[in-house]
Image (cartoon, coloured by chain):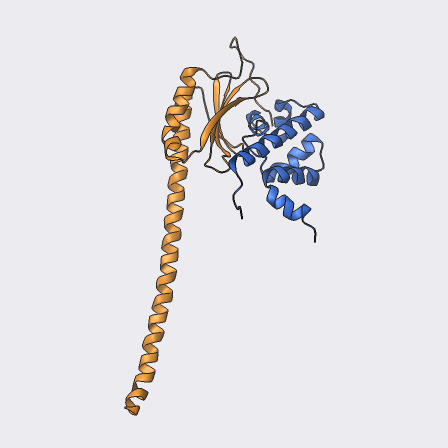
Amino acid sequence: MTVIAFESKLPQRDGSWRAGELKAIMDSFAAQLSTGEAGGWDVGATEIGDPQFYLLGPLPHEDCILCISRLDRIYVLEDGAGRVLFEHNSVATLAERARSILQKKKAQIAVRATLLWCAVREMFKEKLDAMAGEGEELLVHFVPQLAAFA
Amino acid sequence: MQFVKAAPEAKELRRRAGAWLKELRGRAGLSQLQLAQQLGLKYYTFVAQVENGFGRVPTESMEAWARALGVEPAVFARRLLSFYDPELHRLLFEVKK
């Protein structure tokens, strides 16, 4: 496989984000950061000075959940396991996609939690029904005997 | 009893893991780009993410990383476990029978 190496046409490649880029990224994650869904963020760079933005997961581990890198004129969105999720030449478009990925992830978690809750409730209902059924059977069995004693 | 690792400790350990990987890469004479090529990654950005202490080497690709960096996979995985999950590492390798 060929790894894509970018020869920079920009005058500098100092590993820093431009203010406008960072604002677009921060704006798209504002909700996640304010609700605690994301534990924080940080910045770094590749060894040749491509800037990276890391969105961190909740405490205590604060693992990277999303990473945005700028490689010359393209922005790359990866998850914390290195899977490339999206590439685009507009940081605003990429940030928007990153936000929708997080929202989708959250919705998937909510669906899974709901399914689990329904399964647990169904299991309890079945157990209760079985217990109620047993109770009725016992009554049917013992009531005539008790009546005979009376 | 403390069940959850303190955040600064987990972050610091991940950072140390990254520094160790960077050192290994240096010893192997590879750039981030060359390592990414050997790992079959599309971009070299994930190598930087891990070396900067924000990402982790996924378990399923530890062997590939180890071979690319010239380390025996079991030794590599064991060392990474000491950074990523020190408690499990302690139970597996440090607690005496």
Where residue A43 appears, as percent x and y from the top left, is 50, 23
Q: Residue at x 33, y 71 (%)?
A: A132
Give the chain letter for blue.
B
Q: Which residue is drawn at 59% across and 38% down?
A: B84
Q: Specify the quadrant of the image occupied by residue A129.
A: bottom left
Tell me if I can see residue B40 in this picture: no
Q: In this view, does B39 lie to the left or right of A38?
A: right
Give the chain letter for orange.
A
Quadrant where the C terminus of chain B lies? bottom right
Where residue A93 appears, as percent x and y from the top left, is 39, 23
Residue furthest front as drawn:
B1
Tell me if I can see residue A149 in this picture: yes
Of residues A41 and A128, the one nearer the viewer is: A41
Q: Residue at x 46, y 35 (%)?
A: A57
Of residues B64 and B49, the one nearer the viewer is: B49
Using the image, determine if residue A20 lies above or below residue B77. Answer: above
Q: Is residue B27 left or right of residue A19?
A: right
Q: Specify the quadrant of the image occupied by residue B83.
A: top right
Of residues A67 and B5, the one nearer the viewer is: B5
Of residues A106 and B52, the one nearer the viewer is: B52
Q: Which residue is drawn at 65% across and 30% down?
A: B20
Residue furthest top as drawn:
A11
Where residue A34 appears, as percent x and y from the top left, is 37, 31
Q: Specify the quadrant of the image occupied by residue B88.
A: top right
Where residue A2 appears, as percent x and y from the top left, is 60, 25
Q: Is residue B34 left or right of residue A144?
A: right
